[in-house]
Image: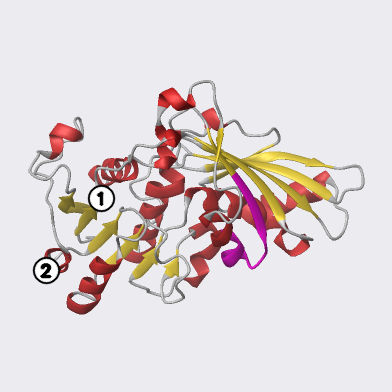
Amino acid sequence: MTRTLRIGLLGARGHVGAELLRLIARHPHLALGFVASREWAGQPLSAQLPGLGLAGRFENLDPGQVAASGVDVVVLAMPNGAARPYVEALDAAAPATLVVDLSADHRFDPDWYYGLPELTRSRYAGQRRISNPGCYATAMQLLLAPCLDLLEGPAQCFGVSGYSGAGTTPSPRNDPDALRDNLIPYTLVGHLHEREVSHQLGHPVEFMPHVAPHFRGLAVTANLHLREPLSLAAVRARYAQRYAAEPLVRLQEDPPWLSRSAARHGACLGGWSLAADGRRLVAVAALDNLLKGAATQALQNINLACGWDERTGIDDAN
């Protein structure tokens, strides 16, 4: 019989934290040890997350309390720059605890396993510190990987995301009034996910993100220059071969619609188009930024680290 593991979540007030709690609530091998949110401390879990059947209250825990909690898994769903004191406390007092960091704090750290399972699963070797990729970074890497060996020059990626990707701290990028009938470009050079993908793939990427009026889901259109010409059949064969065994990656002929990937666990790739000379390829990826871009991927990584089937606790719908 598989042992039930206790999991603690830091940062439950955010959109991703809520999605992760929904997944944990129906996971057959995970039980909640604590749910921490400074803003909601003392409130019943059911008050903010009705319908999940969660007992207990939100807590406000300092790093020492988290390290002494005795849970088997800790998920850090906090803003960038907040993870360090918790990781240091866990390293000192509970180094065997599995830690999954959803922020960007450890995505460039060679001592942490970078967990994009479809591309990095073979690199997992029992590490207890896992860095979850960014949402846009997940879409871009899945889109670029099958043709990475043929890319010439920087890969150019245009992205559009729902405003849930801007978090809960008020700003124009998550203000429905500012976004109404609007599209807001931001951080058009040197975006964190641009650096993340360039680092992970070892190839330069130029990324131009935008936020739109919808709540969840993102799409990336990649413009790729190739060293040698390809046919559409050869392009499709590369993607089919690369993702044949990946149930959370769906391929289709037409460009995927963002609205059809929202609230689904996987990524959809397609819309491959070639210039007349066969050396310019355009392709599109769409996924839910809160699920495959964050919470679903975190659960994949937890399942992998715990020796369970990677899709345990994840709905059958792709």
Mark 1 or mark 2, whichever is nearer to me: 1
Q: Quadrant of residue 270?
A: top right
Tag shown at residue 49: none
Give the camera-side residue of 213 and 271: 213
Element at label 1? loop
The numbered mark, 1 or 2, whose residue comes first in the sequence reads: 1
Residue 112, image x, y percentages:
41, 72
Element at label 2? loop
Q: Which residues are magenta?
A: 197-208
Horizontal arrangement in the rendering, residue 27 relative to residue 270 (left or right): left
Residue 74, image x, y percentages:
25, 61
Mark 2, residue position? 68
Q: What colour scheme has been applied to the protein in the rendered image?
A: secondary structure
Three-letter amino acid code at the position of disc 1: Gly
| Quadrant holding the N terminus | bottom left
Which class describes the residues within 10 Å of circle 2: few (<14), some (14-19), or many (20+)? few
Mark 1, residue position? 11
The structure residue drawn at horizontal position 17% and vertical position 51%, both measured from the top left corner, is 36
Give the camera-side residue of 96 and 311: 96
Q: Quadrant of residue 55?
A: top left
